[in-house]
Image (cartoon, rainbow, N blue to C red):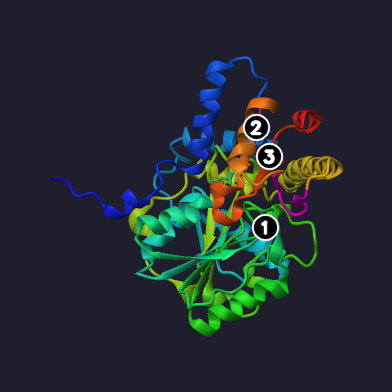
Amino acid sequence: MVQINDNFTKLSDSYLFTEIARRLKAYTASNPDAPIIRMGIGDVTLPLPDACIKAMHKAVDEMSQKDTFRGYGPEQGYEFLQDKIRQFDFKSHGVDINNDEIFISDGAKSDTGNITDILGNNVIAVTDPVYPVYVDTNVMSGRNIVRMPTTKSNDFVPELPKEKVDVIYLCYPNNPTGTTLTKEQLKVFVDYAIRNKSLILFDAAYEAFITESNVPHSIYEIDGAKQVAIEFRSYSKTAGFTGTRCSYTVVPKECRYRRQCTKFNGTPYIIQRAAEATYSEEGQLQVRQLIDYYLLNAKIIRESLSAKGFEVFGGINSPYIWLKTPDGDSWAFFDYLLKEKNIVSTPGAGFGASGEGYLRLTAFNTKEKTIEAMDRI
Ligand code: MLT
């Protein structure tokens, strides 16, 4: 008889965003005309930048001609994209990364999940609340997980774990709280990792939303980080690629083991050309417009909720607004917003025990619907 990896039985029944989709479906089945406004999962609403569309059309045409057709690409990604990443995402922030340290892939969710393949029986530390993928993928591998509460009472700056941990996941700007760490605060973690020979898995999927100057764009801006950190980036929220799928991971030579070439055959050529186009002059302008559009929504949410007496966090360097729920129970407030206001949100408890009492709203809807949602609350 087939043996199933026992660790999978330890997962909760449903992934957070699947559970939210299930509740939404159940509600709309009996209320088909409900004017739902989606502010739950961080999925973008605006179309792809025109520069990316043009690049994809061109790449499709190339695939139709014998002379320009491409089959398998390099598993790690094409150099034309690695070159742009190296210059625009790192060199411009004073960080030297080599092309062969950049692994292009199909999403930060897969990358942060797949990286667990190369980890042994380590003790893992995560912030709480936390993006559930880090926890679930380590439960699948049977690892011990230590939580670092990150709440209003510590100004959303996690304290170092009391016991020695081997791997620390950090996501900044943070999902779900929308808060950030300064360079000095991030340095505390890098120094800990150097001292303890630990590894930091730094998820910078929301880097494009940074507006404040003391917020690091890359962990490699911190001295010594290349010895101890792997960084994840994504085009999903930056350039509207949630359905197009492209990301990359920086694995410095200091932290290298083989996995990717065995288990992955590369991101499609057409998609990598679209990602490359985000760095063209036209692409940069269009990406900036997208980010500014969502940041304006975030401001609208922050300001209107504050004016209504809610305590709100995040939303300045992030598309996420984290608010205190009126009476603690975040699933109850989620249900209230869904059924009474027809607004989909994400309950804080879905991100961990320390998320209870909070709720997350995203700025990824249109400006009109964002304003309408604020009017309804
Ligand atoms: C979120 O809503 O937290 C994200 O969109 C989920 C993801 O990126 O997988």
Residue situated in front as seen by the camera: 264 or 57 = 264
Please, what secondary structure does the residue beneath circle 2 have? helix
Image quadrant where residue 144 sits: bottom left
How many neighbours does mark 2 have within 10 angstroms: few (below 14), some (14-19), or many (20 or more)? some
In space, the residues marked 1 and 2 are separated at their CA atoms by 28 Å
- Left or right of residue 209, residue 19 in this image: left
Image quarter hosting the N terminus: top left
- Left or right of residue 352, residue 73 in this image: left
Image quadrant where residue 295 sits: top right
Task: In the displayed orientation, state which residue is furthest to the bottom.
Answer: 195
Q: Earlier in the sequence, mark 1 or mark 3?
A: 3
Can the viewer see residue 130 in this picture? no
Residue at mark 3: 51
Q: Which mark is residue 173?
A: 1
* Mark whose residue sits in front, 1 or 3: 1
Instruction: Report the residue at 38% width, 52% height from top.
Output: 264
Image quarter hosting the C terminus: top right
In space, the residues marked 1 and 3 are separated at their CA atoms by 26 Å
Measuring from the top left, give residue 278's x and y in whole percent. Answer: 67, 47
Amino acid at circle 2: Tyr
Residue at mark 2: 336
Q: Is mark 3 within 8 Å of ligand 1?
A: no
Q: Is residue 254 above or below residue 176?
A: below
Measuring from the top left, give residue 209's x and y in whole percent. Answer: 72, 52
Measuring from the top left, give residue 361's x and y in whole percent. Answer: 68, 41
Please, what secondary structure does the residue beneath circle 1 have? loop
Numbered range of the magenta stretch: 311-325
Instruction: Report the residue at 83% width, 44% height from top.
Output: 309
In space, the residues marked 3 and 2 are separated at their CA atoms by 41 Å
Q: Which mark is residue 275?
A: none
Amino acid at circle 1: Pro
Q: Is residue 288 above or below residue 54?
A: below
